[in-house]
Amino acid sequence: MAEELNELVDNVVNAEDTEEYGKVINQLVAANDPEEIALLLESLPVVQRLSAWEHVRQPARLAILLAMRHDARETIIREASTQELDEIFQGIEAEDLVELAETLPNRMVDRALAVMDAKQRDLFKDALQYSDDCAGHWANYRLLVLPVNAKVRDALRLLRREIPDHADTIFLVNRMGYFTSAVEISAVIGSPEHINLIELADEDCVAIDGNEKVLDAALKVEKSNFSALPMVDAQGKLIGRMDLRTACEVIREHYEGQLMASAGMDEEEDLFSPVIKSARNRAVWLGINLLTAFAASWFIGLFEATIQEVVALAVLMPVVASMGGIAGSQTLTLMIRGLALGQVTSSNTKALFRKEVSVGGLNGVIWAIVIGLVTYHWFDSILIGLVIGIAILVNILAAAMSGIAVPLALKKLRLDPALSGSVVLTTVTDIVGFVAFLGLGSLILV
């Protein structure tokens, strides 16, 4: 995938100043999926991105915009004329406008609503009743629906029309529109036409509550045996569905968000966003990191006399901090994944804590011996080797315990462990490691 993207970027850049530029752009658009073109545009500096966008023909524009990240999409929308946007809005559906509305000015949302038919406007308003972290906000309204008393012949007639993407089931509703059951299309094909569909219903198809967290809903779809699951409101009325494509996007964005959040960044940040904006977004976490660094430095300052007395301690301090940091990050990563998947609960936390402490203890002993021996041969001092060995053991154990405790504490405080866990953990392991190492040095060496 990376090599293919590199090739696309090179093709665009090399053709930019030629007469064939527009032709090259449209050939790429025709030969690649909207997601690939969106990634291509995101990979170009803003000026080149806007230049390439001018040559993208109208029919492909909406799908490409929908596939782009918010910040990158915003650079295009901000420069687009009202006429261009009006052309994109022609035939737009409710779920697409829900996605675009996050980066559109309110006046442009109103213009898009004005060209929608009444049904799509109502669906858009229904979606806005749910917050953007709820499944109902992202409902797909293209679905196959029949009344609960329908027969196989009715289903076959329905299937002769256009079948939505990722649709492998027909949802059955009662006269009030409440979801009752689902029938797989594969079960319909070949069945006698007079049979009631309810007789072919699959009991394993469970509905998603529109008020459910969108990530939880996506994980349900991913784990189901269906291409899509029905979505209902609080009363059980069918409002739409969540298909496998949407579920995969939600899950991918969630884990990508966690990865970016671990560095204090937003997953929607544009690769070529303005310098001031990028600097502002990152400055907060640089400041927080500076405070934690000063905290660690203050603890080091408490042992200034010891360091002056035994210079070897200053040389070896990074080893202690680094080992603790790595050990802690391993446990923290495991915990964040477990919390995200719902694997970590109050019933298994103690067992997980014992396991991680045991792993930390075993690794601590092994690496304490290794580093102690290396230090002994380096500085020709058994005592210095003993000091750093004990400090390594203590810090790795502390890192393991912190890797469990920190994300659990942050979750209770309703803070994202992926966003601030690494900062807190690094502070803890640095301070524990330095205090253990320099404190032992003061007691044993001075």
Image (tube, rainbow, N blue to C red):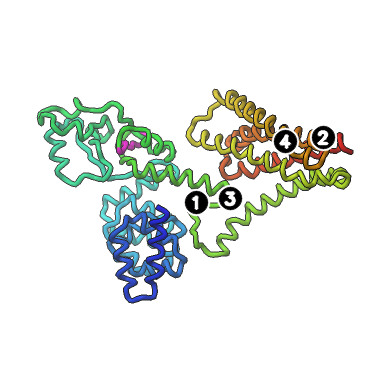
Distance Cα–Cα, label 1 vs label 4: 35 Å
Whole-percent x and y of residue 342?
A: 49, 32
Say whether disc 1 or disc 4 marks the residue closer to the N-terminus: 1
Badge number at residue 382: 2
Q: Is residue 419 left or right of residue 76?
A: right
Q: Are marks 1 and 4 in contact (CB under 8 Å)?
A: no
User: Considering only order in the chain, which callout, 2 or 3, is on the residue closer to the N terminus?
Assistant: 3
Q: Earlier in the sequence, mark 1 or mark 2?
A: 1
* Label disc, if present, on residue 267 of the rendered structure: 1
- Comes first in the chain, label 4 or label 2: 2
- The image shows residue 152, relative to residue 22, as above or below, that is above
**Residue 23 placed where, x, y %?**
30, 70
Label annotation for residue 264: 3
Question: Closer to the N terminus: mark 3 or mark 4?
Answer: 3
Query: Residue 206: x percent and y percent?
Result: 33, 30
What secondary structure is found at the residue carrying circle 2?
Answer: helix
Dominant secondary-structure state across the stretch colored magenta:
strand
- Amino acid at pointer 1: Glu
